[in-house]
Structures are given as C-alpha cells and as structure tokens.
Image (cartoon, rainbow, N blue to C red):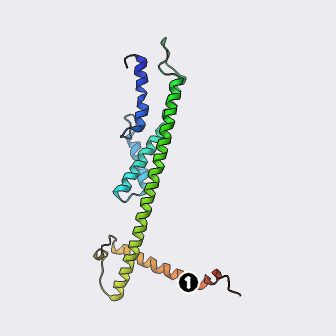
C-alpha cells in the first residue's frame, strides 16, 4: 500500500496476525502479566511430564489469545464510530468493522475449540498417569509388607519403583486403615444392604 488509506487498512492485518502468530505475546502487551497468566495455569493443572507441560502452555497461550479478542472488538468499534476527520473518504468505516468483527468471531470459535480439545487431552493424560501411579503405589505397598513379613530389607528402587520408601510406607498405612474401615463398615452396617434380612 502507498496511500494513507491503504497503509491504514494494511495495518489492520495485525489484528489477524496477533491471533495466529507463533508468539503468544504481542510487542504492545505486558510480558509480566503474561508470565503471571501462565503461572496460574501451571498452578491449576500441576503438570508432571514434558507432554503435560506442553499442553498446559498451549492452554495458557490459547486463553491469552482469547482474552485479547474483546479488546480488539472494542478497538474496531471505536475506530468505526470515530473516524478521523479528513476531506478524503474514511480509511476505515462500518463495512470494515463488520468484516473484522466477523473475522474475530471465527478466530474466537477456533480458539475456543482448540482450548477445549487441549484441555480434554490433558485431562485424559493426567487421569491415565494418576491411575498408573495408584496401581504402582499399591503394588509397591504390597511388596513392602511382604518383605516386612519376611524380615527382609527392601527399597522401592530394588523392583523398579520410582517412589520413595516414605511414600510407600504412607500408602501401606493408608491401605491398612482403609481395609480396617471397610471391615468395620461391613460388620456394623452390612446387614442394611441385605433386603432379605428381617428384624
């Protein structure tokens, strides 16, 4: 573009690029606010692997872009309602505003779908990991009790477990308490679950 109007129209392309660029933070945005935004997602989702960390970062970046859309919409409407005074035709009018608002709507819908897809993927991975950890910890606790019964020293790493011995000890104690609680519940309240009992 060579004319003033053309240059102004061309500058509006930044609205589109800001939502699709690889870098989440635009030059005019506050990098400290962005870092705080990312920390909130890390604190909420507690990623434990490289894949989970990647997905959490993707969530944060997508959310950051989504938060930008209302600001862009406000800017577009402000420009359309208050064109610069000039004898020449306005470089930005209500037709341009409608076009850009429609484009922002499409970007918002795409980003919302991307956010939900990433969130679903992260949750599925974390559920699988936690279930795997629960099974492994249960197995480790059983191994610990077995070695205690035989009077043989044992460390979790001996059988390839990544847990500390304190973690396994706590898990074994919790399992014992749960088993005892289940037994007491059965003795005290088990009869109520049998519809054939008569009093």
Counting labels gives: 1
Question: Which quarter of the figure is the N terminus placed in?
Answer: top left
Q: Where does the image place residue 186, in percent across and percent down from the top left?
A: 57, 83
Q: Residue at x 30, y 77 (%)?
A: 155
Q: Quadrant of the C terminus?
A: bottom right
In the picture as drawn, the residue positioned furthest to the top comes out as 87
- Residue position marked by numbered label 1 in the rendering: 184
Could you say whether the residue bearing mark 1 is in a helix, strand or loop? helix
Q: Which residue is depicted at the point 40% across and 68% down?
A: 132
What x and y, as percent, mark residue 192?
Answer: 65, 81
Q: Position of residue 112 (x, y in %)?
A: 49, 45
Along the line of sight, the residue nearer the viewer: 40 or 192:
192
Q: Quadrant of residue 151?
A: bottom left
Going by the picture, which residue comes out furthest to the right?
199
**Whole-percent x, y for residue 100 in the image:** 49, 30
22 relative to 120, above or below? above
Residue 76 to residue 196: above or below: above
Which residue is at 42% across, 59% downward?
A: 125
Of 47 and 20, nearer the camera is: 20
Q: Would residue 94 be seen by someone viewing this image from the given angle? A: yes
Q: Residues within 10 Å of mark 1 (few under 14, many from 20)?
A: few
Instruction: Please report the residue visible at 33 percent of the width from the left and 84 percent of the height from the top.
Output: 147
Q: Indicate left or right for 154 with 130 as reference.
A: left
**In the depicted structure, whether residue 114 falls above or below residue 86:** below
44 shown above or below 181: above
């Amino acid at each position: 573009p060579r004319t003033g109007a053309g240059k102004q129209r061309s500058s509006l392309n930044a609205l589109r690029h800001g939502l699709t660029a690889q870098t989440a933070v635009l030059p005019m945005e506050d990098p400290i606010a962005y870092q705080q935004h990312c920390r909130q997602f890390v604190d909420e989702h507690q990623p434990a692997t490289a894949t989970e960390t990647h997905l959490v970062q993707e969530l944060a970046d997508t959310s950051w872009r989504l938060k930008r859309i209302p600001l862009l919409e406000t800017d577009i409407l402000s420009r359309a309602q208050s064109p610069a005074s000039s004898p020449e035709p306005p470089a930005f009018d209500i037709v341009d505003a409608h076009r850009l608002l429609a484009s922002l709507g499409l970007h918002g819908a795409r980003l919302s779908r991307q956010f939900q897809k990433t969130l679903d993927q992260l949750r599925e991975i974390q559920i699988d990991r936690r279930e795997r950890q629960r099974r492994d910890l249960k197995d480790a606790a059983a191994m610990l009790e077995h070695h205690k019964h035989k009077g043989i020293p044992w460390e979790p790493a001996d059988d390839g477990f990544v847990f500390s011995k304190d973690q396994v000890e706590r898990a074994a104690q919790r399992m014992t308490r749960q088993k005892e609680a289940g037994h007491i519940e059965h003795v005290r309240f088990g009869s109520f679950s049998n519809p054939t009992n008569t009093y």
